[in-house]
Amino acid sequence: MFSKTKMWTCSLVLMVLWQVQASGSESLLKLLAHNIKANDSDAVCLQCHAGVADNTMNFIHYPAGAGACSYCHVAKPEHLDGSNPAGSVSINRKAENCYTCHDRKDDKPVVHPALMDEESCVSCHNPHASNQKYFLKEESVPALCSTCHDVNTHGNSQHGPVLNGRACVNCHTPHSGNYEKMLLKPAKDLCLSCHNKEIQATNGGARTIPNIQKKLEGTVHRGAAGSCLACHKPHASENNRLLSAPWSTKTYNTYSDRDNAYAMCFTCHKTEMLKQTDFVTATNFRNDSKQLNLHWFHVVDAAGNEDKSRGRSCKICHDPHGAPQAHVINSTWFMNGNPIKIEYQTIDNGGQCTKSCHATRQYRRGN
């Protein structure tokens, strides 16, 4: 029969095994396989290098904390006798040395170039001690990444995950991964892992980012059917909404070819759709019997209003991600925070629209 001591020991081992597996930490085999201890020669090193494992630091790497210098360094006799010529101390900076204790980090298809460097792990991690978790060499993850990567995180619009919490590693794996740019998931899946709900955000005032995944369940904008990065910058932008080109959030604008309030839209769409004449091949939103381009009428001509600054914004009728009605047409838009219904139906060779601005109106194309 087991003694109480043996039973306690077995229970402790099982508990450690369960904790390691549950936390996804290094394999239990590697944690138990190495009993790193300082030897007699290491004591000589510490006579001169006592401050290497600074015990005032928040985190001390175990071999350094144990004074086991010879585990990573080999000092030749000429180093110890004081002459100390170049190369008298060998330093194993290669990742393979780290992998004797730590699980491999380069086993996924897309490997961080830093991990393929000659100095590999120690280009980012201090092998002795650090005030930062994971023995990082800089005070934060963004500061460390920016020593190699020139990523602009400043602008009129900034992406929250880049600035908060785990910062860069909210989206990227630091070692190796399965997806391009070392993303944790395919780009669109990664975006929708956060944008599958409403998010409270601030951009010149409090606003709510809508549930984008829900919008994609309706009629999907062709641009949004692809990668989010086709329209949005992932880190920061001088344009609102992290867009890669200007796009006005105003309900009304004066339209100008030279100062296009909807430049983002026209990275794909042609501005010819807003011409008053010669529009037959440029837009399907037209009434041929009246020779009227209805895009021009609403956006440029401000629906006939003398004040052309009342030109209707694209966003009144269309959602850039997805909407319940055909042609990505909203079922609701907001005026001073109040919901206004839009009812659109396709009809033979055209469509009809009912909204607060006007009663039901139809348009038909001649071909």
Image (cartoon, rainbow, N blue to C red):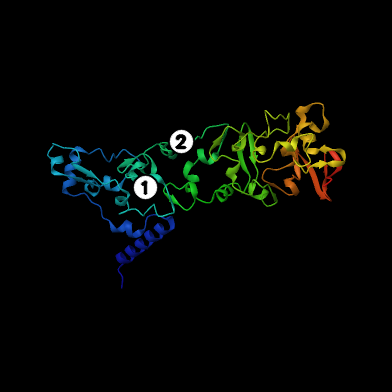
Give the answer, above or below, for where 28 lies relative to 144: below
At 37% from the left edge and 63% from the top edge, which residue is drawn?
Answer: 14
Residue 100 on image: x %, y %: 30, 54
Give the alpha-carbon distance from disc 1 to disc 2, as whole Å. Answer: 19 Å
**SS at circle 1:** helix
- Compared across the picture, whether 37 is left or right of 321 comes to left
Question: What is the quadrant of residue 355 in the picture?
Answer: top right
* Residue type indicated by callout 1: Met
Question: What is the quadrant of residue 311 in the picture?
Answer: top right
* Residue at far bottom of view: 1
Residue 362 on image: x %, y %: 85, 44
Mark nearer the N terminus (1 vs 2)? 1
Bin the neighbour count of mark 1 within 10 Å (Cα to Cα): few under 14, some 14-19, many 20 and up. some
Question: What is the quadrant of residue 132 in the picture?
Answer: top left
Circle 1 sits on which residue?
116
* Residue type indicated by callout 2: Asp
Residue 284 on image: x %, y %: 78, 44
Q: What is the tally of numbered marks visible in this picture?
A: 2
Q: Nearer the viewer, residue 59 or 263?
A: 263
- Compared across the picture, whether 80 is left or right of 299 comes to left
Circle 2 sits on which residue?
150
